[in-house]
Amino acid sequence: MSRAPGVSVRLKLTLSYAGFLMVAGTLLLATVWVFLLRYVPDHARLGPGPSSPTRTDLLDAFAPRAAQALGFLLLFGLVGGWLLAGRMLAPLTRITDATRIAATGSLSHRIRLEGRSDEFRELADAFDTMLARLEAHVAEQQRFAANASHELRTPLAITQTLLDVARNDPSRDSSELIDRLQLVNTRAIDLTEALLLLSRADQRSFMPELVDLSLLAEEATETLLPLAEERGVTIETSGDITPAIGSHPLLLQMTTNLVHNAIVHNLPEGGAVWVTTTVHPETVALTVENTGGDLSPQLLATLGEPFRRGTDRVRTHHAGVGLGLAIVKSIAQAHDGTLALSPRAAGGLCVTVQLPLAPPSAGRNDPAR
Ligand SMILES: Nc1ncnc2c1ncn2[C@@H]1O[C@H](COP(=O)(O)OP(=O)(O)OP(=O)(O)O)[C@@H](O)[C@H]1O
Ligand SMILES: [Mg+2]
């Protein structure tokens, strides 16, 4: 890190300290001088004896002492100022060192400045907090990249194996091969689309418009009705106009993911799903509740992370990629909202997305669809 050589803060503080001491010393000596003059007449030998001092005598006696005193003050000011400034600036050196370490890419170092709370301590604590958040964020990104590459490699590896088998055994039925290849390919496309959607939601690159969540709930339910019927799951939708501001396609995707989850991660038979939208004073909520197996709180805490899947995948025959809830979370956060998961007492899950209520000025009578 190169910068033009300048006067260091320590030197500046030292010079200010010594300068201030010199000014104070000079003023003090000047006061003493003025005070002394009062008692010494300004013309020579007016006094009774021949030994009466004159101003010149006084100046001769006073000036060298005053110069000595000022010299001492200068020395004292420079040394004392240098030491004091060093002590004062020591925390800054630690903060600078930590910043340099962080700049090299090592985010695990912390300053952990001890002592009473002052401006430096606040700066160091804020810096430590920033480092901790950055470290967690980078770790999450790395995990995500590793998982995404792994998931993307799997269909390609399966395709490779299927092609190898077909080449080594040309007499095999090719229609079966084509079916399996198509299945694997579809899955790879789904995964790539989900990843694209996730990055789009994270970037917040959408045009906000007025959206009625209750209409989205109906739309999503209608689309997924065939899947629900196939799995013997009933769906109930309720709620009046629920105005929010955001991207219609993203919020529809969010609702669809939630209803889809509620259908596929449900009881093997006789399952039920309830989709409700509600308006609160400052927020609106979309709640999707479903019957199902018991879910442990530990599992619930991690389900919103990308590529997390529960343990019921085999039973429900739903080979998801584990991005559905991560996408819901990203979309909710991109709309300044939150996602909350809570287990139902009777088994199953209750998922609630809260979004800010659309302001009345947003033309609620004409919700965009
Ligand atoms: N409504 C729900 N009821 C019970 N479990 C659920 C529900 N929603 C999600 N889960 C659990 O959370 C896990 C993660 O859900 P998520 O939607 O992220 O992935 P997925 O459904 O497995 O795959 P996909 O990416 O295709 O959605 C699921 O595997 C499931 O175990
Ligand atoms: Mg899902």
Image: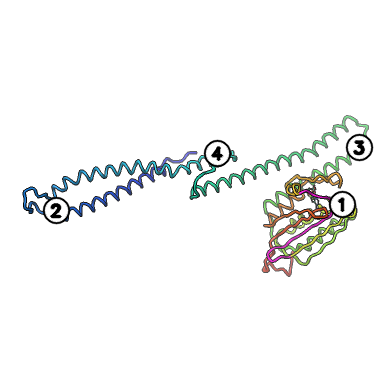
Mark earlier in primary sequence (4, 2): 2
Which one is in front in this view, the residue at disc 1 or the one at disc 3? 1
Query: Which numbered disc covers residue 15?
Result: none
Mark earlier in primary sequence (4, 3): 4
Which one is in front in this view, the residue at disc 4 or the one at disc 2? 2
Point out the residue furthest to the bottom here: 365
- The stretch in magenta equals 279-296
- Residue under numbered circle 4: 101
Point out the residue furthest to the top here: 168
Dot 3 amino acid type:
Ser
Query: Which numbered disc covers residue 40?
Result: 2
Mark earlier in primary sequence (2, 1): 2
Dot 1 amino acid type:
Leu
Q: Residue at x 22, y 52 (%)?
A: 32
Give the distance between the C-alpha atoms of the residues marked 4 and 2, in whole angstroms: 67 Å
- Residue under numbered circle 1: 267
- How crowded is the residue under tag 1: few (<14 C-alpha within 10 Å), some, or many (20+)? many
| Above or below 228: residue 168 | above
Mark earlier in primary sequence (2, 3): 2
- How crowded is the residue under tag 3: few (<14 C-alpha within 10 Å), some, or many (20+)? few
Callout 4 secondary element: helix
Foreground of the two, 9 or 206: 9
Q: Residue at x 87, y 51 (%)?
A: 267
- How crowded is the residue under tag 2: few (<14 C-alpha within 10 Å), some, or many (20+)? some
Q: Are marks 2 and 3 in contact (CB under 8 Å)?
A: no
- Residue under numbered circle 3: 174
